[in-house]
Amino acid sequence: MKVMRAVNTKQCAPIIYALLQLIIFYAGLNAVKGVWPLPHALTSSVEQYPLNPQTFAFDYGKHSATQQGCSLLDAAFRRYFLLIFPDYTAENGQLEVAANNSFSLYISTDHNDCENYPNDDSSERYNLSVSAGQASLNAATVWGILRGLETFSQLVYQDDLGSYFVNETFIEDFPRFQFRGVLLDTSRHYLPVHAILKTLDAMSYSKFNVFHWHIVDDPSFPYQSRSFPELSKKGAFHPATHIYTQSDVRRVISYARMRGIRVLPEFDSPGHTGSWGKGQSHLLTPCYKGGAPSGTFGPVNPALQSTYQFMASFFKEVTSVFPDSYIHLGGDEVDFSCWRSNPHVRAFMQKMGFGGDFPKLEAFYIENIVNITSANNKTSIVWQDVFDYHERRSALSVVEVWKHGCYLCKVRQVTKAGLRVILASPWYLDLPGPTHNWARYYTVWPLAFPGSEKQKRLVIGGEVCMWGEYVDATNLFPKLWPRASAAAERLWSDEKQTSSVEKAFPRLEDFRCKLLRRGIQAGPLNVGHCKHEYQSV
């Protein structure tokens, strides 16, 4: 006969406690390591701290150069409070700085750059330490604070009852590359301003820092110019509904700045300018057939002085509207057939000593545009085509490599010439292929080319490109996210720590669920579900 023995609760207590700690360990540690992109140095423990939205506060450190009243960080605190506590719907009075709070996140900066715009050498480095009752976030600049706030928001997790927790964590983090961009094409399909702003939100969640706005192209000219209003009046899909007013542009730039994102405008020429000619007569080259004008037009006419006068006025406006120190001048895919057909262009080439060398003619044009933008204190970026045909490469500054094939061979060639490089070739997300195939964008090694350390330092970063032939606001987000986030980690994180697709997958899957909860329609990566599915319509 079996005898039921009384349970010694004192003996069992340590076992039960150990089991609970083990459960907490796996639940908590997985939450901590769910940060995307992966920080450079992260240590965490099973020590778990509860967070109460009613007693949580952001505060400025006593010795911080930035203090309350910094509109950029004050707005970030309000924004991140709602991201950290997505279920909390009460009035946000708890955001006020208070002396007694159960948990405070103290921020401290070395410099007060609240009123500035992010630029090409802005520091985004930050240190974050989370302990009992408080967290400390330190950075040289407000831009580093923004990156650290994003990381902290991803460290916070909920249990099955909806309670919020954060684990003891120590992080030292910084970006591997300074330029981490997303290109949107708003010419082939017009993207409403709200879609652009939502993209900027999603970019900040993945720590992208450059919005490359390919704002005009052959199909349409939606940028409403102050100096040349006919450009959008006649070149946009619709002169009232499918344009970006000066107010729209300012709104995008301001929204981006508040998230530590630069806005890089691109006005591509001399090719890709079909829409320009509708509102600016005598700008494009008349094409000839059988010795007479055919009624069609080609690239910008590089043989007329009026072309450069117009461009000088236009870029003077553009450089005053967009505060970033960089501007993208394009220069890709120029069809020489129209120039070749035009007798006036050919006569100009003979006069200039170019003979029949049309790449020399294009180089002449681009050099003039580079000089115009330089006179307005802007650094020019061009597509790799310009490098390929340009003999005087010393006139160039930054080359964006976009063509496929051996793109690292081109990176090596450009850096060997002493020029800086932005890599785009492996990150064309609009190309055909399954949208769940994120690994092809993750297994990219931007510096895997033979070259000196000096050459490697000239690779300033890369960007994801979403061209608009088959993309508009209806499918932009699931095509862009979370695949763009795969590139984001490659550009931010340590390469050796993030070389495994298998190890990255659960973190990216978790991050995709975070995006859904934050209102970003990120496409699925595989069979599965998120605890909080996408709710908006």
Image: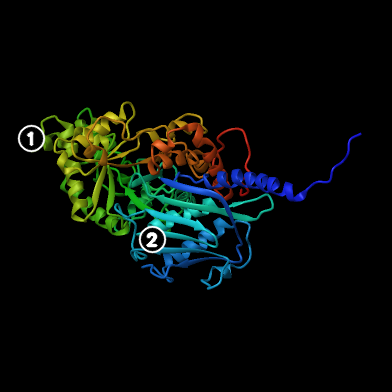
Q: Which residue, as the protein is rendered here, is positioned at the far bottom?
A: 99
147 with respect to 167 (left or right) = left
Residue nearest the observer in this picture, 526 or 474 = 526
Contact flag, marks 2 and 1 (Cβ < 8 Å): no
The residue under label 1 is 353
Q: In the displayed structure, would residue 96 be above or below residue 357?
A: below
- Residue mark closest to the camera, 2 vs 1: 2
Residue nearest the observer in this picture, 77 or 537 = 77
Name the element at disc 1: loop
Q: How far apart, in angstroms, are the residues tagged by discs 2 and 1?
A: 53 Å
Which amino acid lies under the numbered mark 1 shown in the image of this protein?
Gly
Q: Which mark is residue 142?
A: 2
Going 22% across and 37% down the picture, which residue do you hit?
Answer: 415
393 with respect to 408 (left or right) = left
Is residue 248 in view from this perspective?
A: no
Please state the horizontal and vertical placement of residue 284, each as a whole percent of the image: 25, 42
Badge 1 density bin: few <14, some 14–19, many ≥20, Cα 10 Å: few
Going 70% across and 46% down the picture, which residue do you hit?
Answer: 16
Which amino acid lies under the numbered mark 2 shown in the image of this protein?
Val
Q: Which residue, as the protein is rendered here, is positioned at the far right?
A: 1
Residue nearest the observer in this picture, 306 or 145 = 145
Going 27% across and 56% down the picture, which residue do you hit?
Answer: 319
For marks 2 and 1, the one nearer the N-term is 2
Please state the horizontal and vertical placement of residue 103, each as a whole percent of the image: 55, 64
Q: Quadrant of residue 301?
A: top left
Name the element at disc 2: helix
